[in-house]
Image (cartoon, rainbow, N blue to C red):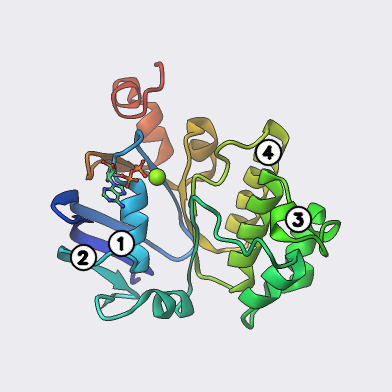
């Protein structure tokens, strides 16, 4: 079975600096990958390169087995790659409903289904993006991504800076999305939560993959957890 999204010997970076150093990563249909590593190790850079915001310098990004070099960001999105970026990317001056409707594409994730998933957003449906709390903005960002009916949902630090109840809510939704069969790449500092939801965990150190395996293989390696994630063993 082809991977939906794949990085092959991928190198990329900014100006003079090469950040990603020969990354290999393959996301299969329905799979949830936890992408981990300390700050500055290249997680966001990898996401930007996968979605087409940054070009591959060496190696390639493949979408359904086909080299995506010629596909701009919107074309990769059209083919089912949705991202919730670190800055959330919602429209501050538009209402919750308008934000959701602008993202809509045909499929089973309708406005109704998204609101059923996030009842809190339903109660804020007429509020503008900038009238929402941080947690609600994050929910709206995820809701928007789901409205595109993606095959892949990429979440970059979705629970960062949120109150505990809001975090729990986001993790609950990540679980539902996973059960619904949407493949995902989840970047998050909450190691326990990532390990409990992911099928596979990929650890980046200085732009290279130092570990790729099931959560149990990472749990079984406290030294790796301590060195690469800063988690006490
Ligand atoms: N726009 C940019 N221009 C130049 N360097 C950047 C830019 N964004 C990130 N970097 C650098 O790339 C490296 C990896 O950053 P990033 O991918 O954001 O890491 P992570 O998401 O794992 O915290 C860091 O050294 C960071 O300083
Ligand atoms: Mg980042």
Choose between 22 and 157: the one closer to the eye.
157
Q: Nearer the viewer, mark 3 or mark 2?
A: 2
Q: Residue 3 got which mark?
A: none
N-term mark: 1 or 4:
1
Q: Is residue 55 above or below residue 223?
A: below
Q: Nearer the viewer, mark 3 or mark 1?
A: 1
| Disc 1 to disc 2: CB gap under 8 Å | yes
Q: Residues within 10 Å of mark 3 (few under 14, many from 20)?
A: some
N-term mark: 4 or 2:
2
Measured in 3D between alpha carbons, the distance from the residue under mark 1 to the one under mark 4, in whole angstroms, is 29 Å
Disc 2 CB within 8 Å of nearest ligand 1 atom: no
N-term mark: 3 or 2:
2
Q: Residue 56 got which mark?
A: 2
Q: Residues within 10 Å of mark 1 (few under 14, many from 20)?
A: many
> In the shown orientation, is residue 155 left or right of residue 105?
left
Choose between 109 and 70: the one closer to the eye.
70
Measured in 3D between alpha carbons, the distance from the residue under mark 4 to the one under mark 2, in whole angstroms, is 35 Å
N-term mark: 3 or 1:
1
Q: Position of residue 159 (x, y in %)?
A: 58, 41
Q: Is residue 104 above or below residue 184?
A: below
Residue at the extreme top: 233
Residue at coordinates 35% horizontally, 75% vertically from top-left? 64
Q: Residue 118 got which mark?
A: 3
Residue at coordinates 66% horizontally, 45% vertically from top-left? 134
Measured in 3D between alpha carbons, the distance from the residue under mark 3 to the one under mark 1, in whole angstroms, is 30 Å
Disc 4 CB within 8 Å of nearest ligand 2 atom: no
| Disc 3 to disc 4: CB gap under 8 Å | no
Q: Position of residue 186 (x, y in %)?
A: 47, 49
Q: Nearer the viewer, mark 4 or mark 2?
A: 2
Label 2: element kind: loop
Choose between 227 and 84: the one closer to the eye.
84
Measured in 3D between alpha carbons, the distance from the residue under mark 3 to the one under mark 4, in whole angstroms, is 12 Å
């Amino acid at each position: 079975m082809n991977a939906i999204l794949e990085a092959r010997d991928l190198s990329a970076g900014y100006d003079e600096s090469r950040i990603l150093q020969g990354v290999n990563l393959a996301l299969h249909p329905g799979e949830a990958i936890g992408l981990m590593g300390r700050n500055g190790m290249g997680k966001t850079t990898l996401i930007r390169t996968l979605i087409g915001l940054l070009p591959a310098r060496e190696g390639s990004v493949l979408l359904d087995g086909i080299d995506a070099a010629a596909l701009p960001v919107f074309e990769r999105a059209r083919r089912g790659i949705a991202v919730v970026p670190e800055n959330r990317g919602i429209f501050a001056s538009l209402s919750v409903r308008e934000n959701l409707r602008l993202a809509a594409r045909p499929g089973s994730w309708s406005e109704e289904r998204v609101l059923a998933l996030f009842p809190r957003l339903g109660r804020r449906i007429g509020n503008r993006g900038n009238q929402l709390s941080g947690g609600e903005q994050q929910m709206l960002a995820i809701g928007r991504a789901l409205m595109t009916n993606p095959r892949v949902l990429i979440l970059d630090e979705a629970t960062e800076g949120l109150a505990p109840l809001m975090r729990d809510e986001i993790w609950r939704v990540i679980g539902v999305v996973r059960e619904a069969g949407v493949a995902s790449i989840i970047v998050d500092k909450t190691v326990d939560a990532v390990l409990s939801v992911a099928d596979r965990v990929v650890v980046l150190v200085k732009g290279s993959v130092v570990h790729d395996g099931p959560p149990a293989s990472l749990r079984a390696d406290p030294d790796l957890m301590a060195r690469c994630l800063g988690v006490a063993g």
